[in-house]
Amino acid sequence: MLSEKNTFQKNYKQVDVRFGLAYPNVYRTAMSSLGYNILYNCINEREDVWCERIIFPNINSLESNTPSRHFDILSFTLQFEEDYFNVLEMLKNSEIPLKREDRGAEDPLIIAGGPCATANPMPLADYIDIFIIGEGENIINDFIDVYKENPDKRLEAYLNINGVYIPEYDNNARIAIIGDMDETYHITHPILSRSDDDDFMSVFNNSIMLNVSRGCTRGCRFCMAGYMYRPMRQTDHQKLIDIALENRKNTGLNKITLIGAAVSDYTDLEKLIDGLEHEGFQISTPSLRIESITLETLKTLKKSGLKTITLAPESIPRLRKVINKSILEEQIFTVIENAVKLDFNIKLYFLIGIPDESMEDIKDLCEYMKKIADMHTNPKRVKFSVNPVIPKPHTPLQWEGYDFKDIKKKTRFIKKEMKNYNIKCESPKKGLVQYILSCGNRQVGAIIEKSVTKNVILKEWRDMTPNYNIDDPLPWDKIDVGVNKRFLKIEHRRLRNLKQTPWCETSPCYNCGACEK
């Protein structure tokens, strides 16, 4: 049984636009997405629109049980590539024609946004009318205004909106991002969920999600978000404290989760934590960058009630140079030592399949993880998550491939070698599928569509594996995220030479292009 507070209930007869905000993943995941929640609240502040949530596997809205096909606009949030399958399943179950060319005026306008839509719209290009490129709340009101002036749903009417890609026109699209975090939309009336079913409890349930910052300029070469959403933008720490207090007044919640691509790089992090603690809040954060964590930060987080610290060393020292993860060994082990002393549980993320990685490197990685686990009085309280590197669009790895056999061999070795430790390894096949969905072209849509009704065997996926050379045109070339291809090619050469690119916050500008947006 699910009960919610702070949802929007409106009279559908008194609004001009019915907006279905669809999330192609389960409730727990949907309601953990800050972006999804921001759009819901932001759109509903308009009196002329009723925005309702439709969350997989349901095809009717939570607010009024309205079927998806009866909305004017049906908007999908694409946070994860694997959710593409659910997008088509939701359309099929809603009796909405899958392909754009088969839909008519009586069908909803189908749009999609989120990181995956921004990075590479091509795999779903035959199924989505319009993609929102960038941070949706930046342009959603302009989009709705155009819709109201365009009742016959002519797609060309949207071409003048910055941050819109329309597959039918294959237009050049430039990312739209928020310039000033102090002026953007911050939630002060979050939805509160209550249920006796864990599936309806969000990851940050009973917690206020505080939008500390967006973007990251550290330049980890595998990280799509770190290139697409540059430059880093921060919310003033006192404004965040005021937002937290307003949220508490409206919800009674006393726990804060700090949300941002690089929370521990936030300029006034200790001031923010001290200020929130002074107001009596408990504070947690999904993850922290090792090089930014101080003993004082750990003590403050522990005092506020945080039980688990999440870190991402990614790999052994040599391979960290390849991916531009410039963390010193002493920093890693100092943070872990301090976390053990403060009795934290510790979760660490590692990558395999880094360019030029050998089996000797994998053996060294296993010894490295054992050394870390054995630092704790109870090694089982140290959890390891090992995932294959997935080359992503708009990163220096976009020209790299995914060697399924190699990843499978390395995964099997790690599982055997680390069987006495608390470790989880991602499926090599799942990694392959994610790579194809991330970096594939328009033809990938056919295999996504087939999967809705039939089982797709491994060979069919492997036959779709991209193989790009450094000067090849790429499926996502029409999408301009600010960082230019010239800079990415330089970074690709540097990774092969084990050259580090220092953090641009502490070094001269590299002219990546992002700050020219």
Image: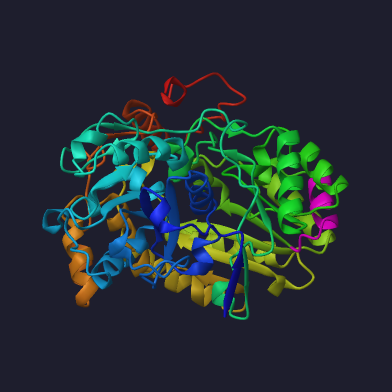
Residue 335 location (% of width, % of height): 74, 51
Number of on-image labels: 0
Verify whether residue 305 appears in magenta.
Answer: yes
Residue 35 location (% of width, % of height): 50, 49
Residue at image x 82%, y 41%? 275
Main SS, magenta residues: helix
| Quadrant of the rendering where the N terminus is positioned | bottom right
Asked if residue 317 can be seen in this view, the reply is yes
Q: Nearer the viewer, residue 230 or 334?
A: 230
Verify whether residue 328 appears in magenta.
Answer: no
Left or right position of 345 against 452: right
Residue 469 location (% of width, % of height): 22, 40
Q: Nearer the viewer, residue 303 or 415?
A: 303
Residue at the extreme left: 101
| Quadrant of the rendering where the C terminus is positioned | top left
Residue at image x 54%, y 37%? 216
Asked if residue 457 can be seen in this view, the reply is no
Relative to residue 321, is residue 13 depicted above or below?
A: below
Left or right position of 218 against 347: left
Relative to residue 265, is residue 196 depicted above or below?
A: below
Left or right position of 282 against 265: right
| Magenta segment boundaries in residue numbering | 296-307
Q: Nearer the viewer, residue 47 or 391?
A: 47
Residue 106 location (% of width, % of height): 19, 57
Q: Nearer the viewer, residue 189 or 358?
A: 189
What colour scheme governs how the chains and residues are painted in the rendered image of this protein? rainbow
Relative to residue 14, is residue 178 depicted above or below?
A: above
